[in-house]
Amino acid sequence: MDEPEKNSCKTYISLRYERVKRCYYNKESYYKDLAEKKLNMCHITKEKWYKYGKLHRKDAPAWCLYHLDGTLLEERWFRNGRIYHKYGPWCRKWNGKGKLIEEWFSYQQYRKWNKHGLLIEESTSDEHLRKWAENGQLLEDTYGINGTSHKWNKNGKLLQERKPILSAEGESIMRAREWNVNGQLMKESYRVSNYKRHREDGPSVREWNRLGILILEKWYIHDKAHREDGPADSIWNDRGKLIQETWYFNGDLHREDGPAYIRYRSGFMTNGSYYYHGEKYEPLTKRAI
C-alpha cells in the first residue's frame, strides 16, 4: 500500500506485505528438479500508523515489526512524530520465540536480556550503565562519560578503572588504569575532562609489561608533550634497560644542555640529535641562547 502525502490530514495506516515462498526438495531428481510452490497468502511484516503525516497512535504502538509467522518482533510508541509512552517503554523487542530481549524508556535509558531471560545490560536516566555476564557476574559499572567506571572479566577480576581525582594543584583530572587477568597493572593515564592528556605533578602515561617492569613513560600538559626538568618521553625494554629518551617543551623537540633525542644500547648512547624549539641543529652551529 502506498503511503499518502505527508501533508494529508487523515489518519491512515501503512502496511507492508511479503508473499511467502516455500521450496520443496525432490530427492529423485536431486537439485536440478527443485520444485517451488507459491502459496496464495500474504503476511504483514511492518505496520505504521500516521496522523497528519507523522507517526501517531494514541492507545497502541504506532510502529510494529512482525515475523512471517505473525510473531511480534518489535513495537514502538509515537505521538505526533515523537517517541512517547506514558506508562512504560516506548520501544520493546522480542526474539523469534517470544522472549523479551530489549526495552527502551528513552534513547539513554534501556534494559537488555539474553535468550534465557537474564538481565545483561541496563542504563538508567542518570547515565548509569551496568553490564552482566551470563553467570551473573557484573562486567561493567559506569557513571556517564566523565564519571567513575569499573570493568571486570567474567571471573570477577578487575580489568579497568576510571575515576576523577584531585592533582597536587587541586585540579580535577581523570585517572584511568588497566590490569591483566593476573592483577598486574599494565597502564596508567591521566586526562582532563576534555580527554586531553594532562598532569603537572608527574607522568601522564605509564605502561608496564606483564612482569611489572616499567617500559614507557610520557609527560603531557594539555595534550602537548612537555617537561622542563627531564625527558618527556622515555622507553625501556622488557628487562628494564633504557633504550630511548626524548625531550619536549610545549610540544616541540627542545633541549638546551644536550641532545633532545637519544638512543641507547647496553646503557651507552648510540645516537643523539639536537633540537631547539623544534628546529634541528648541529652542536657546533648552535644558535646563541
Image (spheres, rainbow, N blue to C red):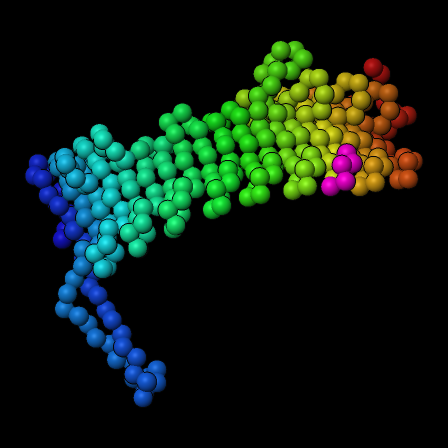
Answer above or below: position of 288 versus 13.
above
Q: Residue furthest bottom?
A: 28
Q: Main secondary structure of the magenta part?
A: loop
Q: Nearer the viewer, residue 256 or 69?
A: 69
Q: Nearer the viewer, residue 122 or 224?
A: 122
Residue 268 visible from this viewpoint: yes
Q: Nearer the viewer, residue 18 or 156?
A: 156
Q: Residue furthest front?
A: 135
Q: Left or right of 31: which side holds 82?
A: left
Q: Which quadrant of the view contains residue 205? A: top right
Residue 215 visible from this viewpoint: no
Q: Left or right of 84: which side holds 226?
A: right
Q: Position of residue 159 (x, y in %)?
A: 61, 37
Residue at 25% across, 33% down: 88
Answer above or below: position of 162 versus 264.
above
Residue at 80% across, 18% down: 229
- The part of the chain drawn in magenta is 210-215
Q: Position of residue 144 (x, y in %)?
A: 47, 27
Q: Position of residue 53 (x, y in %)?
A: 15, 38
Residue at 30% across, 79% down: 25
Q: What number of labels is visible?
A: 0
Q: Residue furthest left?
A: 10
Q: Position of residue 136 (x, y in %)?
A: 48, 42
Q: Which quadrant of the view contains residue 176? A: top right
Quadrant showing the C terminus = top right
Q: Is residue 43 magenta?
A: no
Answer above or below: position of 165 versus 14.
above
Residue at 31% across, 46% down: 100
Q: Nearer the viewer, residue 114 or 228?
A: 114
